Amino acid sequence: MIENKFIPKPYPNTIENGSFTWSSPSNIALVKYWGKKEHQIPENPSISFTLDNCKTTTALSFSKKENQEEFSFEVFLDGEKKDDFKPKIKTFFKRVEAYLPFLKTYHFKIETSNTFPHSSGIASSASGMSALALCLMSIEKELSSDVSEVDFIQKASFLARLGSGSACRSLEGDLVVWGKHTEIKGSSDLFGVKYPYEVHENFKNYRDTILLVDKGEKQVSSTVGHNLMHGHPFAQERFKQANNNLSEIISILKKGDLDKFIAVVESEALTLHAMMMTSMPYFILMKPNTLEIINKIWAYRKQTGSKVCFTLDAGANVHVLFPDAETKNVLEFIQNELVVFCQKGQYINDKIGFGAKQS
Ligand code: DP6
């Protein structure tokens, strides 16, 4: 499937070499993407908060090369050569080659670093792939005569999606939707869009403290998990539910209804893991401490009337979400009752951010 809209016209300019650097955030989904069709098309729409502190910075240096038949690149993480990152990047290059016809004309040096520990279990594919897509777009912009800012971001998101689905939600905006939804104007399966409707004060500067429960490498990758949704007995119901939850989120965000927000977000997190537990083969990514934390959050909420809630991604770590106004109390609660369940007591305080930046 080729999307003609993203195939560039012949480039009027040439460049021999250069370097671009972008810093791109991670994101946490409220309504989850779990299940995809061919060509990285999601089975259902999703929406995420953009994070502010969890970022990947990528410098992409490039120089013209003689042999233009193969991709040529090297990857470094924190200055160390990382050959094990290469297969994923090669797959990405293959998928986007039709849209970036200069890819085989340069040798690339990709130097990347994360603001969060690489082995934290925090997905770096969203921030990593979006930062790389942005660097590639900066090259395309130099080669072209006119690329508008809107087209630049949209194509970067389109490319990032082909690297990792959730990466297309890491370009710009505090709330980002990916996947066609009838009630969200401009939404598309091909790229993420800034959430276009009114958002209540309650959701401004929302907080996310990420509790690092298990920093080990995941036993089952997201890509494998997505594939297990093919033929999954509950798949169709799940996709319907995600669509309905997105419809609900529109009015929740508008009215600032924190109780309904909690219900949708926690249900989404548990449904995601329920899909893993009910696929064939089945698997569990939560750890005993994940459940300890969830129970503590529920008890704290009952005791205090707090609006704190949790969400999970495809791993054991817990994202603790809460309104800005509750920061002091919830951070105290985390410190007193939850940190003991984190590996080496590690956690990351984050809040909602607004997207990627060039540097
Ligand atoms: C559980 O985007 O990592 O975080 O497209 O195969 O790279 P690929 O998967 P990925 O899946 C993320 C799934 C999730 C939910 C979400 O972010 O919506």
Image: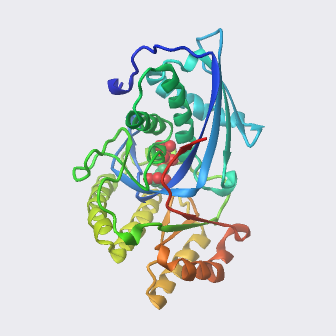
Q: Answer whether residue 115 is visible to the viewer in this image.
A: yes
229 to 108, vertically: above or below = below
Q: Answer whether residue 280 is visible to the viewer in this image.
A: no
Side of 163 where 19 appears, left or right: right
Q: Which quarter of the picture shows residue 110?
A: top right
- Residue situated furthest right in the rendering: 80
Question: Which residue occupies 39% across, 43% down?
Answer: 36
Question: Which residue occupies 62% across, 82% down?
Answer: 337
State the residue in front, 271 or 88.
88
- Residue situated furthest left in the rendering: 182
User: Which x, y percent locates residue 241?
Assistant: 29, 59
Side of 342 where 41 appears, left or right: left
User: Which x, y percent locates residue 99?
Assistant: 44, 24
User: In which quadrant is the C terminus drawn?
Assistant: top right
Side of 299 where 264 appears, left or right: left
User: Which x, y percent locates residue 333?
Assistant: 59, 82
Q: Which quarter of the picture shows residue 149?
A: top left
State the residue in front, 224 or 175.
175
- Residue situated furthest top in the rendering: 66
